[in-house]
Image (tube, rainbow, N blue to C red):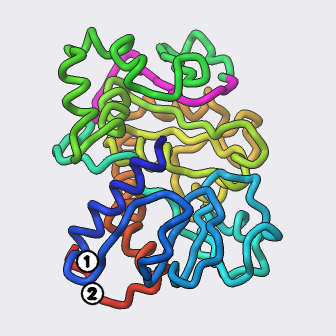
Amino acid sequence: GSYTARCATFKRWVDQCASSSVEITLGTFPPSTSIYYNATMAIKSIPPIQENLGKTLVDVVDAFRIKSLDVPKVFEIIVQNEYQSELFLEHQTHIIEHWYNSDPMDDYVYEANEKSSLKVGIICYSFSFPEIPNNLAISYTKIDEMIEGIHIEDWFLNYMALEGWTNEKKNDVLNSSDYGSGMLYYNLFRTFDVVLVTPKSKHEKLRYGSIQRITSVMKSGVPALVEAKGAAFELFVTRYGYPCVFAEEGGNYPTLAQALTDMKNVSMRQTCIEEGLFIAENFSPDYIVKKLLRALSYEGDFDC
């Protein structure tokens, strides 16, 4: 699954950032009792208490079934935000967000320019899309991953064949150790002038969910228009003062129609690009890997 790939990426970045003093073993539980580890991180699962595991952390991610009472008090918890840490008050917690989907090796930068009509995309797992007034001169593409499938490689060519993508080219990117599925998303994002980012609608996702899709759109170099819905997304846009935001009910934020009208302004889109790229640096793989290593009690230097 996605977290298997994330673990592999973690190991690759550890090898780059702290290769001389950190050895990472990827595996499944229960682990062997014959090997002693300084620290162990379990992803979306609770490992057994074993002396040879050393310091033990549970990365909850979106496994909301994991409750504080289920986790031994000696284990530490990795959470996505402050709200999720409140669920584990009897444990030491570490707020470590997901890094963006991929680490692009190219130098793509979206160029904001005057356009008579904006091409807007929204790619999300199950969403309700507010109506856009016809007089805004905006075309939009809705890709619902609940319908299309959770694996982008299964439906990518449905939208990208006309952009020159072939099955061979898709597979080359997908199987690359530098890119993977994240780069497929980036290239899809780049076919739009603006990408809307809305949260998943379940209560737990709204409050404790990842903001990875936001930072991935930002890192792709395309303006991200973020819906300030749910505690997790609102915390993000408030913390970073991100200006490219809308809310269905308006209130403290523009409505979608108002925000899209603003996005037709070249300078506004350029601001979204620059602010987004700046914010995304806080979610780069090397930055997040360093936070994870510190949580695992690594005290050495970094090479990246």
Quarter of the image where one finds residue 15 = bottom left
Query: Which residue does the image show at 51% across and 38% down from the upper left?
Result: 225
Q: Position of residue 111 (x, y in %)?
A: 25, 36
- For label 1, the residue is 18
Is residue 270 highlighted in magenta? no
Query: Residue furthest toward the front?
Result: 34
Observer-nearest residue: 18 or 286? 18
Observer-nearest residue: 261 or 41? 41
How many circles with numbers are drawn on the protein? 2
Q: Tag 1's secondary structure? A: loop
Question: Which badge, 1 or 2, is on the more N-terminal residue?
Answer: 1
Query: Which residue does the image show at 28% across and 64% down from the upper left?
Result: 13
Q: Position of residue 142 (x, y in %)?
A: 53, 18
As displayed, is residue 82 above or below residue 200? below
Quarter of the image where one finds residue 250 = top right
For the residues bearing labels 1 and 2, Cβ distance under 8 angstroms: yes
Observer-nearest residue: 190 or 84? 84
Is residue 117 highlighted in magenta? yes
What is the magenta range? 111-128
Query: Which residue does the image show at 74% across and 59% down from the upper left?
Result: 66
Q: Where, quadrant-wise, is the C terminus in this rendering?
A: bottom left
Indicate left or right for 168 with 184 as reference. left
- For label 2, the residue is 301
